[in-house]
Image (tube, rainbow, N blue to C red):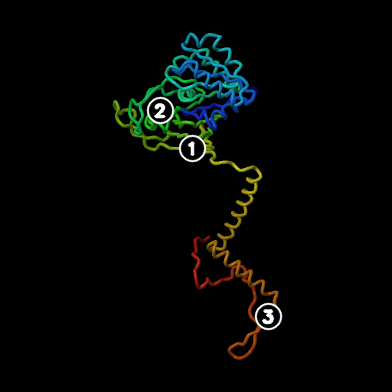
Amino acid sequence: MTTSGPGALFAIGGAEDKLKKRLVLQEFVEAAGGSRARIVVVPTASTLGPDVIDVYSALFAALGAAGVVGVRPENREDADDPAFIEPLNQATGIFMTGGNQLKLSGVVTGTAFGRAVTAAHARGAAVGGTSAGASILAEHMIAFGRSGATPRQRMSQLAGGLGLVQGAIVDQHFAQRNRYGRLLSLVAQSPGLLGIGVDEDTAAVVRGSHLEVVGRGAVTIFDGSRITSNAHYAKRSEAILASGVVLHVLPATATFDLKARALLSYGPQPPAEELAEIEAAEADLRKLASEIAAEGVSPAYYAERKRRAGRRTAKTAQPPRTRSSAAGQSRPEATEPLGAGAELSRPDTDPLPDSGTA
């Protein structure tokens, strides 16, 4: 696969749909090259036997991948063996399964295998993982920890990751296993790192510094750059103070800038021609708002004024009618339209509120 830069990273929260829509896995196959994809499945973290390779091989083949192979280093000696590394050199996609993330970290990080995964990503291969395979994408990965909503001291433990997602910690099965507390505790202890929690059947797809959400659930981000915390002196399993953390809960289609730590967009984006029409309509509205502000009256009053002025203007096209005055004389009825700045009495019924002034 030929690309102009690093490939996409897929941090999948686990339990991705394998039977129905399979949206997350389909997105991974497309990022790996679609019908030209050559995917290597790495089931090192899994406690299952060859079945786990068979399942993902069948799934990726059904989704259109050109070829799928399984490579399973079981120890660091395997991870330095060229026979295990060679398939990675030809891969357009590398997918790491779930299981024991501490085992995955212990076997892969700091070995030739881990360096080959990093090199594949740098040349454009899509690299992803589910559950444990998602956590290892970051430089610091959660090895294990307790569930719970309240952040506590010693709630979790970190291990080394591959460092493909910089400046962040990735957790998975996030909402389903109530892992808010353990991720927040790590952010409190290391405020320079973003905490990224990924729900099941959901992927945080990272391209460069941009993160996009794909799937059924959400991606939760904790930004502790302005946190106030007592993590440096909280003892044992005490609750940790975490005040001033910025929370982002991002559903599918939302995009986020990991460097700027800011929301970029959300919701389906309309076609380009519709965007042009929307921009033109917004320009018209801004002009109208400016005119309304200049008048110093509410929008509803402004509309009523224009309507009545237009009605009076239309009467000028008709011959003037005469009517009797109190002195018995006839005179033409006034038909002049309102001029700029002329005063107009409000209607006697249903008075319109004045919502703003210039």
The answer to which quarter of the image holds residue 302 is bottom right
Q: Nearer the viewer, residue 37 or 208?
A: 37
Question: Would residue 318 be found to the left or right of residue 221 on screen?
Answer: right
Q: In this picture, is 331 found above or below 3?
A: below
Residue 141 picture location, percent across and down: 44, 23
Q: CA distance from mark 2 to mark 1?
A: 22 Å
Residue positioned 44% across, 28% down in the render:
172
In the rendered image, residue 12, in percent from the top left (x then y), is placed at 49, 28
Q: CA distance from mark 2 to mark 3?
A: 83 Å
Q: Are marks 2 and 1 in contact (CB under 8 Å)?
A: no
> Quadrant of residue 268 in the image?
top right
Q: Which residue is mark 1?
A: 250
> Circle 1 sits in a helix, a strand or a loop, which is it?
strand
Q: Which structural element holds mark 3?
A: loop
10 Å neighbourhood of mark 3: few (<14), some, or many (≥20)?
few
Left or right: 235 as drawn, with respect to 37:
left
The picture places residue 162, in percent across and down from the top left corner, at: 49, 20
The quarter of the picture where the N terminus appears is: top right
Residue under pointer 3: 320
Amino acid tagged 2: Ser
Q: Which residue is mark 2?
A: 190
Mark 1 vs mark 3: in front = 1
Q: Disc 2 vs disc 3: Cβ atoms closer than 8 Å?
A: no
Task: Kindly identify the residue that appears in the image at 49 percent across and 31 percent down.
Answer: 201
What's the distance in space between the residues labelled 1 and 3, CA to CA? 66 Å
- Single out the mark in the foreground, 2 or 3: 3
- Kind of residue sitting beneath label 1: Leu
Name the N-terminal-most of marks 1 and 3. 1
* Label of residue 84 in the image: none
For marks 2 and 1 on the same chain, the one whose residue lies earlier in the sequence = 2
Callout 1 touching callout 3 (CB < 8 Å): no
